[in-house]
Image (tube, rainbow, N blue to C red):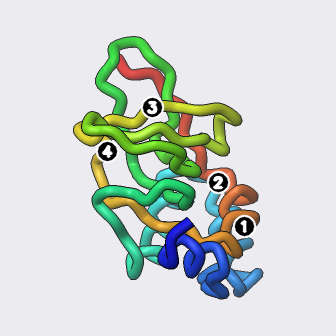
Amino acid sequence: MDDAQQRYLNSSINRFTDDAEVNRIKALRDEEEMMIEIITKLDDDVDVIPDTGQYFTFEYRAKTPMITYDRFPLVAVTSIYRWGFIGMNYHWGGFRRYTWEEITTNLYRIYPLELKVMRAIPYQYFTINN
């Protein structure tokens, strides 16, 4: 593990310490509105290419016809390739492939202390690509 990864894992950053704000986001009940609030909160720490071993959320638009996918995944990145990356999607509970061309926003970094709150916000958006 390199120094940057160690700093990430030991980070004390938590942008979701205000319970009232988190509850307000949860109460929106609309996944798109929740995602807008989330990315507004996370907009100070974005990447174009993720780091393995780190958590991210982003907007994704699958290109494969008639496939069910999570439009707003929350992932732990496990490996990076030329075509994209593989990550554990916490909304699906399994590993998924994400291609660069299907990611439509920046990758918003989630710090370890933020993961529990992010998992509790029901912003997953399962949809079918028509």
Residue drawn at the location 56% of the way across and 49% of the way down = 75
Neighbour class for label 3 at 10 Å: few (<14), some, many (≥20)? some
Mark 1: amino acid: Val
- Comparing 28 with 71, the one in front is 71
Q: Nearer the viewer, mark 1 or mark 3?
A: 3
Nearer the N terminus, badge 1 or badge 2? 2
Which picture quadrant has residue 39? bottom left
Task: Give the residue type that dot 2 points to.
Answer: Arg
Is the Cβ of the residue at disc 2 closer than 8 Å to that at disc 3?
no
Q: Earlier in the sequence, mark 1 or mark 3?
A: 3
Disc 4 or 3, which lies upstream in sequence?
3
Secondary structure, mark 1, is: helix
Residues packed near mark 2 inside 10 Å, few (<14), some (14 to 19) or many (20 plus): few
Q: Quadrant of the C terminus?
A: top left
Quarter-of-image position of residue 92:
top right
Q: Residue at the top extreme?
A: 66
Residue at x 43% of width, y 65% of height:
108
Which image quarter holds the N terminus?
bottom right
Distance from disc 4 to disc 3, alpha carbons, whole Å, reads 11 Å
Q: Establish if 20 lies above or below 117.
A: below
Q: Which mark is residue 57?
A: none
Q: Amino acid at mark 3?
A: Arg
**Residue that label 1 marks:** 117
Up-down relation of residue 18 to residue 53 (above or below): below
Instruction: Mark yes or no: residue 89 visible.
Output: yes
Q: Nearer the viewer, mark 2 or mark 3?
A: 3
Q: Residue 11 at what x, y percent from top left?
A: 62, 83
Which of the two discs, 2 and 3, labels the residue nearer the N terminus? Answer: 2
Reading the image, the residue beneath label 2 is 29
